[in-house]
Image (cartoon, helix red, strand yellow):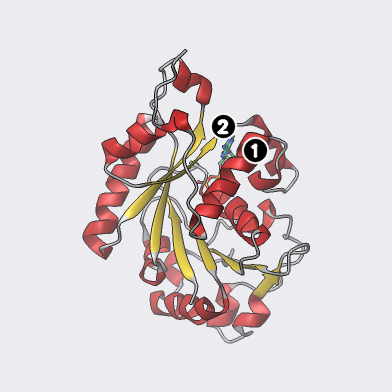
Amino acid sequence: MGRAYLILSGKGGTGKTTVSTSLALALADLGRRVLIVDADVGLRCCDLLMGMEDLVVYDASDILEDRCSLQEAITVHPEKSNLHLLSAPQMIMPGDVPKKDMIRLIDEAKPQYDDLLIDCPAGIGRGVKNVWQSADEAVIVATPDDASLRAAERTSALLFERMQLRASLLLNRIDPFLIAVKEEKRPGVIAAALDLPLFGGIPESYDVYRAVLMHKTAYECDARTVRRAVRRIARRMTGQNVRFPRYYHVPHLS
Ligand SMILES: Nc1ncnc2c1ncn2[C@@H]1O[C@H](COP(=O)(O)OP(=O)(O)O)[C@@H](O)[C@H]1O
Ligand SMILES: [Mg+2]
């Protein structure tokens, strides 16, 4: 039975889609059977970031309205046959999707995959409520600034209150230089302050944005540091014991 991860955030634009798509590719590279569920109803973009926009024929609403089966609605990645995408409907609002149906859909898909990454809209509004019952884990993506972290903390509290889901923290856009000059807190320190387990960290890089422009994921970008960070998180998700870089916890000596 596959493990379903809700990829969430408090604030918008922290990198949920970047994280979902790049982790999906890295997991597929490790031989896992992966499904990305684009749950950003009305604002989908996983297809764009994976260069699959011309391949998508159906979306989740077509299954729910009996126009196609789950298998027919799934788009297979052009280069990785073990990486699949279920697109979000574009022309409706999150409130138009019946909650029970979305959960049924994800539960139906679970046995066919090792990992299901559910790329959510920001916050925990209706779009997230449509899918959160089908999740085994919640990963909050935040950037290391206080506004994003405050929103992440609030989101994790609400998730626990309402769903008894304990979230972990994925810090995106970490800047090792700013950490070295003590302007940015270390990921380990941030996670401890928020009382959340650290799921992983991804560095800031101009190459991530360049990859987006070319409809590629962060895992395919030119920055080796980003690719390695994504691969480390994916390996940890498969149960391997992968340590965090030293600077996440230990102050630089120089
Ligand atoms: N590690 C990173 N380094 C640089 N830019 C990033 C990084 N992660 C995300 N971005 C940029 O931030 C923007 C928002 O990312 P996105 O994944 O769409 O966020 P969300 O899905 O949370 O709204 C995109 O333009 C993306 O290229
Ligand atoms: Mg997004």
Disc 2 marks which amino acid? Glu
Q: Residues within 10 Å of mark 2 (few under 14, many from 20)?
A: some
Q: Residues within 10 Å of mark 1 (few under 14, many from 20)?
A: many
Evaluate whether residue 39 shows in this view: no
Vertical order, 241 against 81 (above or below): above
Q: Circle 2 — which element? A: loop
- Horizontal and vertical percent for residue 127? 43, 62
- Seen from the viewer's position, the closer of residues 223 and 59 is 223
**Which residue is rendered at x = 30% and y = 61% of the image?**
165
- Horizontal and vertical percent for residue 106? 49, 75
**Which residue is rendered at x = 52% and y = 44% of the image?**
15
For the residues labelled 1 and 2, the Cα–Cα distance comes to 8 Å
Disc 1 marks which amino acid? Val
Vertical order, 73 against 119 (above or below): below
Decide if ligand 1 comes within 8 Å of the CB at mark 1: yes
Decide if ligand 1 comes within 8 Å of the CB at mark 2: yes
Vertical order, 252 against 95 (above or below): above
- Which residue is at the far left? 161
124 sits left or right of 101 in the view: left
Mark sitting on residue 208: 1
Mark sitting on residue 204: 2
- Seen from the viewer's position, the closer of residues 244 and 180 is 244
- Which residue is at the far top? 254
Evaluate whether residue 69 shows in this view: yes
Ligand 1, seen in the image, is in the quarter at top right
Callout 1–callout 2 Cβ contact below 8 Å: yes
